[in-house]
Image: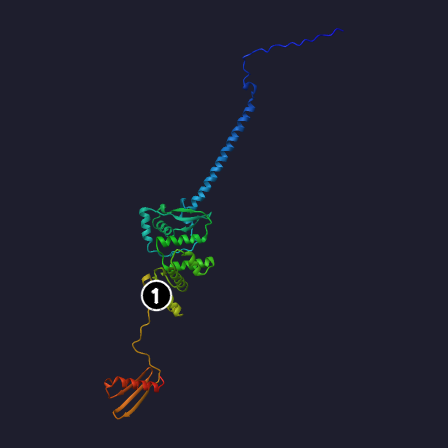
Amino acid sequence: MSKRRVFDINFEPEETSEAPAPAEEQTRRGPMAAAISENADALTERQSAEAEIRAENDRLAHEYVSLKRDGAIVARVPLGDVAMRKLTRDRSTTRDPDLEELKTSIRDLGLSNPIQVEDTGDGYELIQGFRRLSAYKSLFKETGDERYATIPAVLVAKGEALEKLYRRMVDENMVRRDISFAEMGQLAASYARQMDLEVNDAIAVLFASAGRQKRHYIGSFSLLMDKLGHLLQYPEAIPRALGLKLVKTLEDQPRAAQHLSALLEHQKPNDAVAELAVLNKVVAPKPVSEQAAPSTSSKTTIKLNRKSGAAKVIGSKGKIELQMNRDFGAVDPRKLEAAVRALLDQLDL
């Protein structure tokens, strides 16, 4: 059988200037694939946007809490939503002689300094601004004007230490409008009970910015309010000096509180001036009686007959009298002194 011969033929590559086929022709997709791809891109973009929104919300939330803590968030809150349970107030809840002035200022100029409240979830707890809140309540009751139905308030972050809240309330009132010693004493006693402290320790905490002497006065008024607070209608009107005298009277005279109670019940003072008159009567010193009480001491009378005439000697408590018809002022002082010394020596005096 004859063999077939195989020849290797090498062809020169042909030069061509044609560009490769367009990519889109090589990767052409159907409508379904294109839709899926577009949905995936949209989902990725949405997830990215949501992540950015969450990050922004977290940042704003932290910023909001920080602003609340710094007292920079102000809102109008309904009067009925503000409670006063957390702190014992350092102001009288029945009388405030300057409340009318504050109401006039609010009517004319508005409230320049918002109250401070803590958000409790179902309302608000008053932290600062008792007088301002009282003024708004009074204005709303008197006028019915809806602009007084809500009050501007700074929202304070929840959970601040109770001691710090008390200190803030006390320092505000001591700086802006000095409160009475009776109100400070009552607050110290209430805080001591709430925190299970001695009154002096409570005073040291609440009135740390006050001087030592002032803290001593507050302690005295705290004792005064503990003994007489239930009897008094206008304790905030008691001056410092009168309050200290009352405390001393209570310490020296155990029945003084009972006596004061009887006086107040009998006279029924209807204002601060009348009540102060009763208190002053209690601490007034007792008048000295013009007639001395009959003496119960013994009395001795001796009559002596002398060449120069009769002499009468009377001895009583604290006194020896010598009665005689003689000018003792003309006697030599040295002889008179010697005679008296001899008398005293004879009596062992």
Residue 286 image position (x, y, % from top left): 33, 72
At a point 56% along the width and 24% down the height, the residue shown is: 33
Name the colour scheme: rainbow
| 210 vs 119: above or below | below
In the image shown, does 18 or 96 lie closer to the viewer? 18
At a point 29% along the width and 84% down the height, the residue shown is: 337
Residue 34 image position (x, y, % from top left): 54, 24
Give the SS element for disc 1: helix
Quarter of the image holding residue 278?
bottom left
In the image shown, does 274 or 334 lie closer to the viewer? 334
In the image shown, does 53 or 20 lie closer to the viewer? 20
Mark 1: amino acid: Leu
Residue 304 image position (x, y, % from top left): 29, 91
Residue, disc 1: 279
Quadrant where the image shows the C terminus? bottom left
In the image shown, does 91 or 151 lie closer to the viewer? 91
Residue 339 image position (x, y, % from top left): 30, 86
Asked if residue 90 lies left or right of residue 292, the reply is right
In the picture as drawn, the residue positioned furthest to the front comes out as 334
| 222 vs 35: above or below | below
Density class for disc 1 (Cα within 10 Å; few <14, some 14-19, many ≥20) is some
Quadrant where the image shows the N terminus? top right
At a point 38% along the width and 66% down the height, the residue shown is: 247
